[in-house]
Each structure stands twice: as structure tokens, then as C-alpha cells.
Image (tube, rainbow, N blue to C red):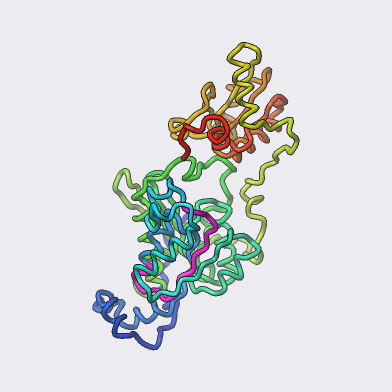
Amino acid sequence: MFTANVSAETLEPLVEPAAGLSAEEVERYSRHLIIPEIGALGQRRLKNAKVLVIGAGGLGSPALLYLAAAGVGTLGIVDDDAVDLSNLQRQVIHGVADVGRPKIESARDAIVELNPLVDVRLHNVRLDASNALELFAGYDLILDGADNFATRYLVNDAAAILGKPYVWGSIFRFDGQVSVFWEKHGPTYRDLYPEAPPAGSVPSCGEGGVFGMLCAAVGSLMVTEAVKLITGVGRSLLGRVALFDALGGSWREIRVSKDPAAEPITELVDYDAFCGITPDVPTDTEHTVTATQLASMLASRKAGLRDFELVDVRESGEYDIVRIEGAVLVPQGRILAGEAWGELPQDKDIVFHCKAGTRSANVLAAARKAGYQRVSHLDGGILSWVRDVEPNKPVY
């Protein structure tokens, strides 16, 4: 719910101060101590703070480094992924030597190297409704750097149930967004986005790309908001969303207020189902082909013995990196939005494929609901194709 006028409520410091600072801490944080608004009291609050960061990826990387540098005493990291070479374009907390390692371990090592005074707690789990409340309960503040809508709604609801504030950041291509949500004092993520966008209508960063340097701008602003909440200084972004256009080099903001008619958040739900991303995927082999089967089908088509359409449902940038010869590009978003059905014949076989199989499964389910009978999809996507058929082609 957008509004033109939101009261600028003064928030009390989120964290009580620690008893004191050591001589090492005084020297390390001296540039904070001489700022009147922070000073020794604010630095002691930072020392006593416990902050949980969701994801050690594009936003988590700069956020974790700046939180550690600022002297936040306890940092928790939730991530169950491993470092991939493609991460290094933007996830600056990791290095080449970390490829293949769990992200939380790589991030911990970088934090300890930067500031060994920080207590780093690792949560090598996928955040879901079964563990969110227990995880969040041990922290004062949450930073949400998740890259999917299901996790964003989950973080919002768990924080609301526990009465905790959280800082949200989002990035896509050249655009970034940052805000603070805290149900007891103002709006939540559900006031900004009451309904999740249709599944597949918004490409992820892995599908649409992200300008690497954008992560630093958005991640550092998230930490700025976290430090302000912890120390009680400045004007919070609660009730406002900061929007950054990296390509245009401009910041602007929109205001958002609490919807008085919204139902209170009292329990966690199935967030995949809420976001419409639980695909109705057929389990029978009639609608799934393997990479080697597809290679044989393409050979038969080339010899004039078979006729079918191979439809690539990825984004154009992905298609430019690597493709299967003979595939036609029709991005998932156009199909699920109903724009591209006229380009897909119903009188011949169609095989859909994407990067790993998830998007093509969504398209397959939608096609069958739209009345298409002769449809299937490539199990494992182009990743399985490269692995099993053309290993010299690049992956991303």
C-alpha cells in the first residue's frame, strides 16, 4: 500500500550496550568512536548485537564484510550452497580457492581474516518454514539477501511473528531496492507486495543477470540501515523503499504504509505454494526426455526422419552463452503470460528445455493445462546436455 505521507517515527536503539570496549577495540573502531552520533555507546551496542544474514551471495557478501568491519559482535549466516566460479563476478567474500567449498565456510574465513573479534555462527541449512522461527529467535536483527520471492515472504512472516525488524534488499540487472520492515512499528514486505508475482514472470538473477557492482551499493546500504537500527541513530528506511538505478546513476524513493485491513501474520505457510512455484510436473517418462534421447531425436530430425520443435525457454542472454543447435528461443515469461502460445504449434511434438529443468517443467505443466498433448521437456536442462552430449560447451 503506497502513501504520500509516512510519519518519521524515532526508533529506540535495538540493542543494549556491551559493558565496555577493549584497548584493541578502541583502536580498531576509533573512526566510529569519534563520530558523535555513534561514539563509544553506539560501538558497544554494535559489539552486543546479533545479526543473522540470509545468504552469503551477492548481497550477503558485502553485507557480511561491512557488518564485521563495523564491529557487530555476532554474525549468523544461513546458506546451503557451494561457491561456483560464476559467483565470483559479484560475491566478493569468496575467491578462486573457495570454488566448491560451502559458502558459509568461505564467508566465515573471510570474516575472521577481516575481524577475528566477531563470533561467526554457521547455519548450513535451506531456510524454510520448519526452521525459520527457531533460527531467527537467537538474533536481534535479520538481513534478507535472498534471491527468490518464497524466501522473502518467509523471512517477512517469521520476523513479524517474532516481533523482529529486518532489512530487505533486492537486485536485478541494473536495479536495486532496499527497505526496513518491522510489523510492530510500520509496514511489512506484504504491504509492499501483497501478492507474489506469477511464477516465472520475474526472472531470477541466475536467469536474467545482475550488474556485479550493484551488489556493493545495495549491500552497503543494507548494513547502513542495520547499524542505524542497532544504535538508534538517524532516520530509518522503515516506511520507505530506496530504489537505485545503477545504469542511470540515480537514487529515488517510494513510501509505503501499513495496510489497516491486512490480516495479522500469525503462522508460517507453504511459501512455494503461495508463490505458485510448486510445479504440477508429470512424473511419467512420456513427458520427459534425457539429453542422450534428445540428441538421438535431433539426429533423426536432421535426417528428415522426425519432425518436432525444440523450444528454449531461457532468457536471451543465457541463449547467447550456450545453446542446443536447432532450438528456438521463446522465454518462459512470454509463455506463462500467454503471449507466445500462437508461436507453439499444437500439431507436432514440442520439447521444452531450460538451464536445469525447473523452468521447462513449469512451461510443460502450463502447456498441458492449455491443451497441448504432444509436449515434453529435457530432464536436467542444458546442464545435462553439456554433461552428457557436448562437454566442450560452456556452462554458467
| Residue 181 in magenta stretch | no
Residue sitting at x 59%, y 43%: 199
- Name, please, the residue furthest toward the top: 304
Which residue of the protein is positioned furthest toward the bottom in this rendering?
Answer: 19
| One can see residue 374 in this view | yes
Which residue is painted at 54% across and 28% down in the image?
A: 330
Vertical placement of 147 versus 44: above or below?
Answer: above
Residue 116, position as x, y percentages in the image: 37, 74
Looking at the image, residue 137 sits to the left or right of residue 278; the answer is left
Q: Is residue 68 magenta?
A: yes
Check the image and report above or below for 227 versus 81.
below
In the rendering, at what x and y percent does residue 393 appear?
A: 47, 32
- Residue 274 vs 63, above or below: the answer is above
Which residue is drawn at the image coordinates 36% and 61% (left, top)? 221
Q: Residue at x 66, y 65 (%)?
A: 267
Q: Position of residue 151 (x, y in %)?
A: 56, 56
Task: Residue 142: tell me if it is visible.
Answer: no
What span is colored magenta in the figure? Answer: 67-83
Of 343 and 243, the residue lying toward us: 343
For the residue pair 87 and 96, the one nearer the viewer reads as: 96
In this view, 360 is above or below 68: above
- Residue 50 location (% of width, % of height): 47, 74
Image quadrant of residue 12?
bottom left
Work out whether residue 259 or residue 112 is closer to the camera in this orientation and state it: 112
| Horizontal side, residue 151 vs residue 86: left or right | right
Labels in figure, total: 0
